[in-house]
Image: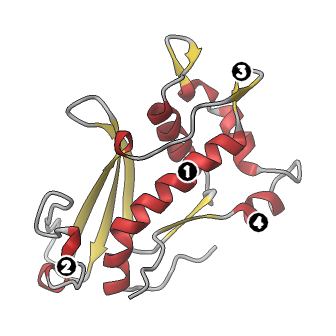
Amino acid sequence: MAHQPVFEPDDEYDRICASDGVSRYDAYLDRYAAWFAEGGLPTADAERFAAAAWRIALPPIMSPGYVRVHGLVRDTQVHLDDERCPTVSVDLAMSSEPDAAESPCTSQRWCGELDCWHGADDSLTVARIAVPLASIPLPDPRYQCGQPDTATAKAAVRVICAVVNAVAGCAVTFDPPARSPR
């Protein structure tokens, strides 16, 4: 079964809608360059670089984001895990806990450590997926004149998208709503 992408970078939209004709995302990277600093210097830590690149690529920072988001995504955040490693978490709305628990994606351990079922109300069940950035191969941070390098930031975002899609895509395929419009 093919999995639906949950997150998709959209380079064409990024270029077409850029005021400079090159990249909207680039302008946001420049505006939020401080997010890539540690101790006043650009970070050399690939996980921290990728975490900043991810946060900037999505709403509410970019709206619409550099990354298109599936309609089941309720939230995505970057936080530090218990070992102080940046981790991307994604909350996916599911139709119901029993339906989601019967997902054909048993290899994703929906009843295990990758999710937490909770009902904020009786009509919403959320699967939370957490992806530690230390566990994935990320590009080394690069900068141009002290600003985050756009190609490197986009590469980091694509890596995160691929890893999150591999984990979350099976839930989206199993419980498909309409995709979010551009």
First reached walking from the N terminus: tag 1 or tag 3? 3
- Gap in angstroms between the C-alphas marked 1 and 3: 20 Å
- Residue shown at 32% from the left, 33% from the top: 85
Instruction: Give the crowd class for mark 4: few <14, some 14-19, many >=20 residues within 10 Å.
Output: few
Q: Residues within 10 Å of mark 3 (few under 14, many from 20)?
A: few
- Which mark is first along the chain, 4 or 3? 4
Place of residue 115 in the rendered image (x, y in percent of width and height, measured from the top left)? 19, 62
Q: Which residue is mark 4?
A: 12
Left or right of 87 on screen, residue 10: right
Q: Quadrant of residue 26?
A: top right
Res. 61 visible in picture = no
Q: Name the disc covering residue 88, or none.
A: none
Instruction: Name the residue at 18% across, 77% down.
Output: 106
Local secondary structure at mark 4:
helix
Report how far apart the C-alphas of labels 1 and 2 lie in the structure: 32 Å
Residue farthest to the top, as pictured: 39
Front of the two marks 1 and 2: 1
* Distance between mark 4 and mark 2 Cα atoms: 37 Å
Residue that numbered label 1 is attached to = 157
The x and y percentages for residue 167 are 34, 66
Q: Nearer the viewer, residue 113 or 116?
A: 113
The residue singled out by tag 3 in the image is 146
Identify residue type, mark 2.
Answer: Ser
- Residue where numbered disc 2 is placed: 123
Q: Hey, what amino acid is under mark 4?
A: Glu
Gap between marks 3 and 4, in whole Å? 26 Å
Percent x, y for residue 15? 80, 58
